[in-house]
Image (cartoon, rainbow, N blue to C red):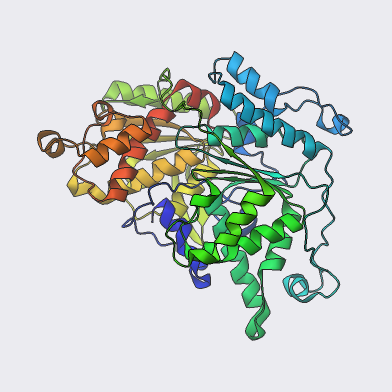
Amino acid sequence: MNLNAARSAISAAHRARTIATSCEKWPRIDSTSRTLGRVYNSSLSTSTSSSSTPSIEHNIFNGSTTNHNSHSSQAHGHKQPLAHYHNLVESGTLRGDEHQTRIVQKLQHLHDELMDYTPPPIPDADPSNSLISRLFSRNDPTPTQPPEDAPKGLYLYGDVGTGKTMLMDLFYSSLPPYIQRKRRVHFHAFMIDVHKRLHAAKIAMGYKGGDPIIPVARDLAREAYVLCFDEFQVTDIADAMILRRLLENLLNYGVVAVITSNRHPDDLYKNGIQRSSFVPAIELLKSRFDVTDLDSGTDYRRVPRALSKVYYHPLTPSNALEIEKIFKSMTHHDDKDPPVKNRQLTIWGRKLSIPESTSKVAKFGFDDLCGKPLSAADYLEITKTFGTLFVLDVPKMGMDSKDKARRFITFIDACYESKTKLFVTSEVPVFQVFSDEDAASGKPISDHMRGIMDDLGISQDVVGKSSIFSGEEELFAFARACSRLVQMGSKEWVDTAGYI
């Protein structure tokens, strides 16, 4: 299963139990996925900050400066959004942009408001009866309005390449250490988590039925009062039907959210089934969030990048030796964490064998990853567990290896969304492993494909053409994967990725 299938397959409660291992379908054009909360052992989720493992974003943007409010003794050493942004620009990691600076100033303002915000208390679950007690308690009145002092959330929208994810990472990593109840998650991954919780609540309520959204929202608010949603979009009717009440209850429980999206709220779920039922959610976003356009005319994906030596081709003994040296240099420095053969990961009740790994670095052969019927859930669990991955012996793929190509694209998407540092040895330049001679000698690239490549900031000269993929979604997935491989080979990516 690909990333989008893993996200949208949970539209009905019973489908929350399993994720299929087929790679027969493709992501929707603008869907991607990150990793989600470990609370439910979901390989599609990132943990809240209460986890003992620091978040990927915290490590990426880790820094130090002083704090300025009453919590300064606890927050000493954390770097605030605006100062951090300026440091990244000064170091050359980012290129300065006046419009983007204004957006960061908004993030700084929200950061300052959160420093003075105390969320309302949310009762803990009754230990005597767990979920059922929460569902039927009469002594836990549900708030009908957000707290008066709750900061207004931010809804940041813009096209591909406007820096949405970078800004989200920067803001989340800049939250002071004393804000422990926080969560940064890809929106589709969050909704999978929500559907699983709703399913559990419905089971607890039994044949009498009832509304499970309020107790689920209460539990989510108890776990995190700062929520950062990346890639907010609605393509599934099951999500659309519950979003207004879910968001409304989260806000009423004092949750403050920062949201990034490709679309203005008015454009969400356009032409969707029963869209009229989703319109109240749109109005909620417009009234309770500061809706801000990120489009400054600069596509940050097209800013020239210096490439790092992480991709090696062709498949020669010298390249194999070089990549092995890098692997050993990253895995043999800690006697307490030596490389282990065939480490076992448990994913949705199944065992997945990792050929060779430490706790943070893993090495696979291409067939280990893509020659087996692995799913998006498997790839996301791998990228959640290991910050650095080595993939060896990637072949050039044609029509006879279409399933492997699909799985490899799903794997690339997982690496990208998890900010994984990736090393690859391949038969041809890794951007061109999907290109084949039939396409190269056939008809010229279509206008549709050319438009996709232009949107993603890549050219045919870099990635070639492929006859493997034909449908609109397949073509986009192919082009996006090539674009991401280019980005993951950049010095900026390599210098900041790979932390768990």
**Residue lying at 77% horizontally and 53% vertically, measured from the top left:** 254
Spot occupied by residue 172 in the image (x, y as percentages of width and height):
66, 37
Q: Quadrant of residue 322?
A: top left
Q: Nearer the viewer, residue 355 or 481?
A: 481
- Residue at 43% x, 30% y is 488
Which part of the image, by quadrant, shows the C terminus?
Answer: top right
- Residue 61 appears in the figure: no
Residue 304's spot in the image, x, y percent?
41, 19
Number of marks: 0
Residue 392 on image: x %, y %: 34, 35
**Please, is residue 150 above or below residue 444 in the view?**
below
* Residue 207 figure quarter: bottom right
Work out whether residue 233 or residue 275 is closer to the camera in this orientation and state it.
Answer: 275
Q: Nearer the viewer, residue 41 or 365?
A: 41
Residue 287 visible in rendering: yes
212 displayed left or right of 469:
right
Is residue 480 toward the left or the right of residue 298 in the image? Answer: left
Residue 226 relative to residue 441: left or right: right
